[in-house]
Amino acid sequence: MALHVTQYPKYSIVIPAFNESARILGALHSVVDCIRGRGWHAEVIVVNDGSRDATAEVVQGFAADNPDVRLIENPGNRGKGYSVRSGLLHSNGDIVMFTDADLSAPIEEAELLFAAIVQGADIAIGSRWLEKGRQTHRQPLYRQFFGRCFNAVTRAVMGLRFADTQCGFKAFTRSAAQTVFQLQTIEGWGFDPEILFIALKRGYQVVEVPVSWAHDERTRMSYLKDGIKMLEEIAIIRWNALRGRYGKQVEHIHRITLQ
């Protein structure tokens, strides 16, 4: 049965999760504590990407005592890009964002993204490289090297003039998110350059914001295997652009009635 609400949340915070039972509970406590401490009117959406562990059960248990938290289940393991898209398109906030389950960027830093949007940006993206001194635990050198190489390729091939396209900490106006994510096609790790490419092509103002960052050694991304895949996806993005895929009309999705 639907529990009808008269006021939608101002903020939606989406957390994609795959086999995150070890750290999702801590992440949810941190996010909810921040929301309550700052008096945000917000919802939290965890998107379970076909986890084989107890991620869904942990989230459901937490949500039972925290009605502003809800779980979305993907039809199997589809990828981070698919999870972020699903979460944001099912969100109700005026400002919507996604963050990684490891909270490498503390959730309190979301205030910086929100402020950039209030000041006129359509999209605010966190950056680990604009102010390197804000990194409290840096990535290993080989990860920094591969990350910089990939960033150089996105600059050269796609014209993305951002210091950090891959930071998993981005916020959008509801209108921008509805347009960008309906046009997104990349479902894996390489979705970040695509959504930024779409945003610029559609004329949205994208602002890069320096945020604090602490690398988590448990990250599952392989810069060699996933990096090669992401290069393939850049070629797909360019092909999509040539075919006019990103110029299509989209419909504004109505906010859902919470159950």
Image (cartoon, rainbow, N blue to C red):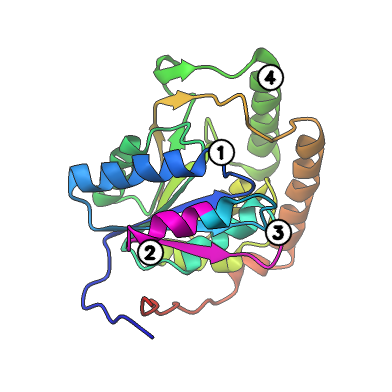
Mark 3 or 4: the one toward you: 3
Residue 15 visible in the picture? yes
Distance between the alpha carbons at the discs numbered 4 and 1 = 29 Å
Q: Which amino acid, by three-letter code, is at mark 3? A: Arg
Residue 40 marker: none
Q: Nearer the viewer, residue 219 or 113?
A: 219
Magenta region: 58-78
> Where is residue 60 shown, x and y percent of the image?
47, 60
Q: Which residue is mark 3?
A: 78
Is residue 75 part of the magenta span, yes or no? yes
User: Which quadrant is home to the N terminus?
Assistant: bottom left
Residue 22 marker: 1
Horizontal arrangement in the rendering, residue 46 relative to residue 69 (left or right): right
> Where is residue 68 shown, x and y percent of the image?
32, 61
Mark 2 or 3: the one toward you: 3
Of mark 1 and mark 2, the one earlier in the sequence is 1
Residue 101 visible in the picture? no
Q: Which amino acid, by three-letter code, is at mark 4? A: Phe
Of mark 3 and mark 1, the one earlier in the sequence is 1
